[in-house]
């Protein structure tokens, strides 16, 4: 059982290393766009918080990509 757990964690970490930057940037983009649409259509101020979370995810995705590819 422990070997299966270690293998699952290792597979998850490899997946996060190879696809994390793209998924973070894509998720951040979707959240920011959705928050802007909600803000325009409803005027709900909570959309600003969602926009900030999306922007932070997008920025984390850029940092992850730069770290993975050795950019500074």
Image (cartoon, rainbow, N blue to C red):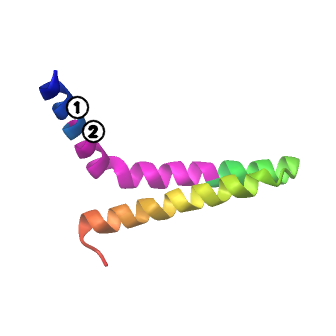
Question: Residue 23: x, y in percent?
Answer: 42, 48
Looking at this view, is 50 or 3 the one in front? 3
Question: Residue 53: x, y in percent?
Answer: 60, 56
Q: Is residue 38 above or below residue 12?
A: below
Q: Which mark is residue 8?
A: 1
In magenta stretch: residue 21: yes
Residue under label 2, please give it: 12
Crowding near the residue tagged with mark 2, few <14, some 14–19, many ≥20 C-alpha atoms within 10 Å: few
Query: Circles 2 and 1: CB distance less than 8 Å?
Result: yes
Q: Secondary structure at mark 1?
A: helix
Residue farthest to the left, as pictured: 3
In the rendered structure, the answer to whether residue 49 lies left or right of residue 72 reads right
Q: Is residue 35 above or below residue 10?
A: below
In magenta stretch: residue 39: no
Residue 49 sits in which quadrant? bottom right
Residue 70 sits in which quadrant? bottom left
What quarter of the picture does the C terminus occupy? bottom left
Magenta span: chief secondary structure? helix
Q: What's the magenta region? A: 11-31
Question: Residue 65: x, y in percent?
Answer: 34, 62
Crowding near the residue tagged with mark 1, few <14, some 14–19, many ≥20 C-alpha atoms within 10 Å: few
Residue name at image x 75 percent, y 50 percent: 37
Residue farthest to the bottom, as pictured: 72
Question: Residue 8: x, y in percent?
Answer: 22, 31
Q: Secondary structure at mark 2?
A: helix
What quarter of the picture does the N terminus occupy? top left
Residue name at image x 17 percent, y 34 percent: 6
């Amino acid at each position: 059982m422990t070997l299966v757990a270690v293998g699952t964690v290792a597979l998850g970490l490899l997946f996060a290393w190879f696809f994390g930057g793209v998924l973070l940037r894509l998720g951040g983009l979707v959240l920011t766009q959705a928050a802007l649409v909600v803000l325009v259509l409803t005027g709900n101020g909570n959309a600003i918080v969602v926009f900030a979370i999306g922007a932070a995810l997008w920025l984390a995705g850029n940092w992850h990509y730069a770290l993975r590819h050795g950019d500074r």
